[in-house]
Image (tube, helix red, strand yellow):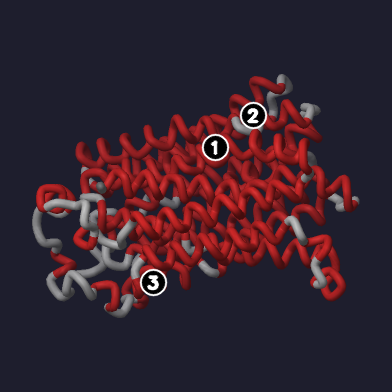
Amino acid sequence: MRWQIVAMLTLITALTYLDRMNMGIAGKYIQDEFAFDTQTMGWILSAFVLGYALFQVPGGWLGDRYGPRGVLTAAILWWSLFTAITGLVPRLPLRHWVGLVGSFIMIRFMIGIGEAACLPNSNKIIAFWIGDARRGVANSMFLTGIGFGGALTPILITSIMRRWGWEMSFYVSGGLGIFVALLWYTFATSRPEEHSGVNAKELEMIRPSPQPEDTHLQPRNSMHVKTPWKKLLSNVSTWCLMLSYFCEGYPNYIFYTWFFIYIVRVRGLTIKQGGLWGAAPFISILLLAPLGGWFSDRATAQFGKRRGRQVTVWVGMTCSAILLTLGAHTTGNVLAIFFLSGAVGCNMFATSTWWATCNDLTRNFSGSLSAMMNTWGNIGGWISPILTAYIATHLGWDQALDFAAVVTFIGAVLWIPINADQNLEV
């Protein structure tokens, strides 16, 4: 049952990337229809990420307080509703009060609020459903939903838009979300002890012995214990996790927002070619994210949690920075897309280790810790579309990608003080 739960989380993550990336693809049509310039489109694309970043901690805290199953269900319904409303933006009364650009920004911001609860609560599920030895693999598996969602989105959304218009792509995405929310609520529970399909043998495999941090908690009410914010925020590993995840999020959001427009407008691909090649970075994620989770768990078993988690991030982020630079300065489109796709894949090779480390440091409050971490990652993601557009407009796209490579490498360096062997609950 635990791996079926992880599979459901993978599906939910895929849905989030369908709903956050469709604007990056529809953006080409919206720009043409309403004559938005590049800088304006950057503000629309980044509005989602601002809402996503600001509501990470409330979303994670709610999961710790009330349980991730119900919070995640409500979140899916919320962002799916506003995704569908995006198609109605030009006809909403809101346009008369804040303008068309302001309407797009506000609706994308609301989608970000809903999606903010997704990854912290998914990580909370992993913390309770998966034992220590498989945390890297489990986190990498639900993160492969990014690869599935990202690979399918350009193909699906461009196909829908070419036949029925950009508005229909948002209606379809919203409808899929409602279906997934009902499926999750029917199938999942917050803890394995609450699931009728989990037997004693599987419970023993998940947690073979009582955890030290559980000695002061009752199994059913541990989610109602006050989050130790002071202890979390006074720890060096916490701050380095947050700052380094800022550096993880910045380059990734170039691919989530600008990549399709980049390969069509800068690299000169057709819309159809863009739909196909736009999936390449996410196929890379599909291949390298699970490998990174496996590598992280193997390195941890070999070298211990601290060094094993560090080595995984150092390898992934250093390779990502190198490939970003190569992709920026390669003239051939196919080879450039290959390098750039490899860059985001290597980034996601390392990403599951951030989330696994949150569970290493605190299982009972992993929702709150991972939410704080993801807040910083998405502050980087919020800045990324705006700053990338600014650098590309004033200096060129090569320089915009070079800057992302520098940020990526800094993310690797910031892992030097992080110690996943710590337990922040004792």
The residue wearing badge 1 is: 344
Q: Judge the density around disc 3: few (<14), some (14-19), many (≥20) Cα neighbours within 10 Å.
A: few
Q: Secondary structure at mark 3?
A: helix
Which quarter of the rendered picture does the C terminus lie within? bottom left
Given residues 63 and 306, the one toward you in this image is 63
Residue located 71% across and 39% down the image: 160
Query: Which is nearer the N-term, disc 2 or disc 3?
Result: 3
The residue wearing badge 2 is: 327
Given residues 340 and 11, the one toward you in this image is 11
Q: Judge the density around disc 1: few (<14), some (14-19), many (≥20) Cα neighbours within 10 Å.
A: many
Q: CA distance from mark 2 to mark 1?
A: 11 Å
Query: Which is nearer the N-term, disc 1 or disc 3?
Result: 3
Q: Residue 233: which disc? A: 3
Q: Looking at the rendering, which quadrant does residue 383 occupy?
A: bottom right
Residue located 65% across and 57% down the image: 83
Asked whether the residues under the numbered discs 2 and 1 touch, taking CB atoms below 8 Å apart as contact, a structural biologist would say no
The residue mark sitting in front, 2 or 1, is 1
